Image: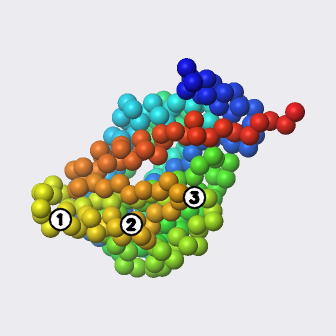
Amino acid sequence: MIRAGLIALALALATTSATASCRQALALGLDVSGSVDAKEYRAQLDGLASALNDAEVRGKILEMPSAPVRLLVYEWSGPGDQHVLLPWTTIDQSAALDIAIETLRQTRRRDATPGTALGVAMTYGARQLAQQSDCWKRTLDISGDGKSNLGPRPRDVKHRIERSGITINGLVIGADAPNIGDLRQAEISELSAYYSAEVILGQEAFVQAALGYDSYADAMKRKLLRELEGLILSYLPPLPDR
């Protein structure tokens, strides 16, 4: 009853508040650098589409249509290779989410340089989120399977944008099908620590790990649920002027 009352109050206030027309802007950056082969590229696009189409994730995204989620998806590799796959899309009904999912499934790989310019990818995502200043929360997700090797250091980029109010989360991808005790377990732990120190930003920021591209869809689902959880109850728009 308490939860239902708070949701009803949030819905009522959201319809009258001019300060927040969406509850979350979510920009997702996908790594398409040289370490990502054609199969792995497809695993990311289809994995994201599958996660967005999961019944629980769909429910969270569509939970508050009066203050919807906005999605943007882009891919990144070298310093000059950031490319938008899904432009800012307001997900206020099932049909809009279906179109976004189908767009990802129909996307085909384009040519790109093989470098891993993670700092540039972070800057690009932050610049996209700056366009969504009316959203209650702005979140940048960076997926990657390696450390930055070109362009500005991620830690320097993070320091430059830390006052923007943007949250940056990471989804790190390890080698496929790791075994317990395998060296690949150490590799994913090292990459997770790197993202924790160099990439993520914000009080609620976190790193989600996928133990291989075959686990990407499940990891993405868990990450999206964590990001979407609690936004309705943790934020109430300001009361309108009387």
**Regarding mark 1 in the picture, which secondary structure is present there?**
helix
Q: Earlier in the sequence, mark 1 or mark 3?
A: 3
Tag 3: Cα neighbours inside 10 Å, few (<14), some, or many (≥20)? many
Q: Which mark is residue 166?
A: 3
Q: In the figure, 192 relative to 133: above or below?
A: below
User: As drawn, is 18 to the left or to the right of 145?
Assistant: right
Q: Which mark is residue 25?
A: none
Q: Look at 42% across and 70% down and name the residue there.
A: 197
Name the residue nearer the viewer: 50 or 193.
Answer: 193
Q: Which residue is mark 1?
A: 184
Position of residue 222 measured from the top left corner of the image (x, y, whole percent): 36, 44
Q: Is the residue 176 above or below the residue 71 in the image?
A: below
CA gap, disc 1 and disc 3: 32 Å
Quote the CA–CA distance across marks 2 and 1. 17 Å
Q: Which mark is residue 195?
A: 2
Q: Residue furthest front?
A: 2
> Dot 1, how many residues are within 10 Å of its Cα: few (below 14), some (14-19), or many (20+)?
some
In the foreground, 205 or 114: 205
Secondary structure found at label 2: helix
Estimate the spatial distance between the alpha carbons at disc 2 and disc 3, rounded to whole Å.
16 Å
**Residue 2 as seen in the image, left or right of residue 237:** left
Q: Amino acid at mark 3?
A: Ile
**Whole-percent x, y for residue 194 in the image:** 36, 70
